[in-house]
Amino acid sequence: MNMQQSLKINAFGIGCFATITAALIAVTFVLTKAPIEENVRRQKTAKLYEIIPTNKFDNDLFTDTVELEGTEFGYSQNISAHVATVKGRVTTIIFPVRSSQGYSGDISLLVGINADTSIAGVRVITHTETPGLGDKLELKKSPWLHSFTGLKKVAEQPWAVKKDGGQFDQFTGATITPRAVVNAVGKSLDYFHKHRQRLLDPSVISGKNSSGETNNGN
């Protein structure tokens, strides 16, 4: 076997290996995509139900949504806000919100706002904040997120951490993380106030037919 033949055989072998590897990666992606998406759905659904208990709405909270401009909430693409209703009346909107003001990176949140403009609840979906400092935004580490529940944004009370003259505690040794969350929640409230009439209109909800009943595809 001469050098040229050897090179051709080696090249063929490398090509076959690359093809097989690519095929395995593609198959793995296909096989794991659905379970990963289902896991994300379950985690998000659990957070939604933490914000608004199942006895506080009578619709499909996950599929009944309203599409909104994502740039208003820190996203480059449109987002789907989840809508809770009781007998066809909108009671709560839960916005997916992302803040880029975190100390270590983006902080993804769910911000629930009731029809009366009070906060139903706030939950963190993902973050990369410093363990022992910024991670106090996790409920298993601190009840700090509960400080938002029931509040309304009024001019007489600055919506900021106490270090900035506001009403919200910052974390010991960490101000950037709570400031980012406070600002993100405040912007969500501002958006709700500005667009309240449209957001409380049941006709804008995706997943419902003209009679206001949830469309389950049956």
Image (tube, grey):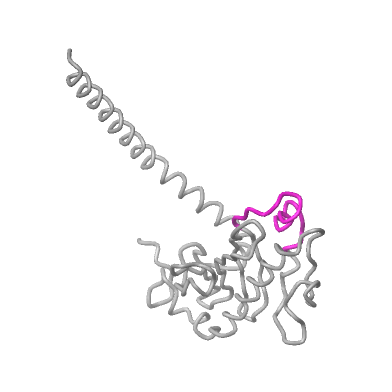
- Residue 9 in the magenta stretch? The answer is no
Is 57 situated above or below 140?
below
Q: Nearer the viewer, residue 52 or 149?
A: 149
Residue at horizontal 41 percent and vertical 68 percent from the top: 207
The quadrant where residue 122 appears: bottom right
Q: Position of residue 160 (x, y in %)?
A: 74, 75
Q: Is residue 136 magenta?
A: yes
Across and down, in percent, residue 68 comes to 47, 74
- 24 vs 82, left or right, is left
Q: Main secondary structure of the magenta part?
A: loop
Residue 33 sits above or below residue 3 on the image:
below
Instruction: Relative to 67, say whether 3 is above or below.
Output: above
Q: Which residue is found at the position 19% from the left and 24% from the top?
A: 8
**Relative side of 13 to 110, left or right:** left
Residue lying at the far front of the rendered structure: 3
Q: Write the residue at 58% across / 80% down.
A: 192
Residue range (magenta): 125-145
Q: Quadrant of residue 121?
A: bottom right
Camera-side residue of 29 and 213: 29
Please name whichever residue, 209 or 167, is drawn nearer the observer in this view of the structure. Answer: 167
> Depth check: 17 or 11 in front?
11
Tell me the quarter of the image containing the N terminus.
top left
Q: Please identify the quadrant where the C terminus is shown.
A: bottom left
Residue drawn at (54%, 67%) of the image: 58
Q: Position of residue 155 (x, y in %)?
A: 72, 87
